[in-house]
Image: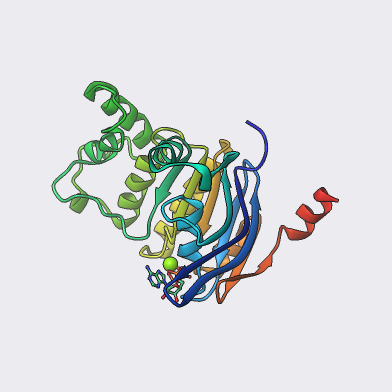
Amino acid sequence: MTGPIVHLARVSKRYGNVSALRCADLLIERGELLAIVGPSGSGKSTMLNIMGTLDRPTSGTLRIDGYDVGGLGDRELSALRARTIGFVFQQFHLARGVPAIEVVADGLLYSGKPRSRRRKAAEEALRRVGLGHRMLHLPHQLSGGEQQRVAIARAVLGDPPLLMADEPTGALDSRSGAIVMELLRELNDGGTTVVVITHNRDIAASLPREVRLKDGRIEHDTAAPRLAEEAS
Ligand SMILES: Nc1ncnc2c1ncn2[C@@H]1O[C@H](COP(=O)(O)OP(=O)(O)OP(=O)(O)O)[C@@H](O)[C@H]1O
Ligand SMILES: [Mg+2]
């Protein structure tokens, strides 16, 4: 596949009389690693949810992996999402009493793969995030950082080309946060496009690209000059 993995063209989102996202234009190329930053309420999660096809824009066009999302029905959209996008959220909702390997394997529950294959894929994903030695641990037997890595293992299970993380380090101390960021970098080095929402200025500044939102608008995009150059 060539072409951008994500393309928003004049995308807006309204919730009742709230304009959560206003006329956003954004191009994300394959293999990028970028931060989305901005004050609370500026529209970061709204933008991520729209890019993740979890929510539809009120107006504008969204292309994911070359597909015009607005032209897809719910089933086609779920299929596109399942093969293209992995999600990591701030609060890892790991079910109580379920060992790590099952939490991850359940990510393939609707894939039609038999249980043994699902467990094998889960083992591989847990090794990938450095938790090969914690497969049978229950969520309460894992540190916050380890729980977040379980969530990442689940998100990258089918090896999606696009990984979206909404404040993945928000609930972690700085050391665990650094480990999670390192892991996201490694996945990016392996070719995965990674989009991270963060409140942490140091993290944002350390990434190759930063998209800043304010009041639902893209206020600044550190890649904009480069993209404009390429287009001309
Ligand atoms: N489902 C909804 N219904 C109504 N308003 C919403 C809804 N979701 C978000 N909003 C509003 O849209 C605006 C943007 O919200 P969003 O969650 O995208 O902000 P954010 O940048 O992610 O903030 P935070 O850093 O606090 O997570 C906010 O004013 C919010 O109150
Ligand atoms: Mg948010």
Q: Quadrant of residue 76?
A: top left
In the image, residue 21 lies at what x, y percent?
54, 68
Left or right placement of residue 161 versus residue 205 in this view = left
Q: Which residue is at the front of the view, 187 or 11? A: 11
* Residue 44 image position (x, y, % from top left): 50, 66
Colour mode of the rendering: rainbow
Q: From this viewpoint, which residue is outermost toward the right?
A: 232
* Residue name at image x 57 percent, y 66 percent: 202
Question: Relative to residue 117, is residue 167 depicted above or below?
Answer: below
> In the rendered view of the protein, which quadrant contains the N terminus?
top right
| Residue 75: x %, y % from top left | 38, 38
Q: Which quadrant of the frame does ligand 2 lie within?
A: bottom left
User: Camera-side residue: 131 or 118?
Assistant: 118
User: Is 114 placed left or right of 177 in the picture?
Assistant: left
The answer to whether residue 186 shows anywhere in this view is: no
Which residue is depicted at the point 35% across and 52% down?
148
Percent x, y of residue 231: 81, 49
Residue at 43%, 56% in the rendered image: 55
**Front-most of residues 172 and 98:** 98
The answer to which quarter of the image holds residue 193 is top right
- Can residue 115 be spotted in the picture? yes
Figure label count: 0
Q: Which residue is rendered at x = 48% and y = 41% of the image?
A: 72
| Position of residue 133 in the picture relative to residue 56 (left or right) | left
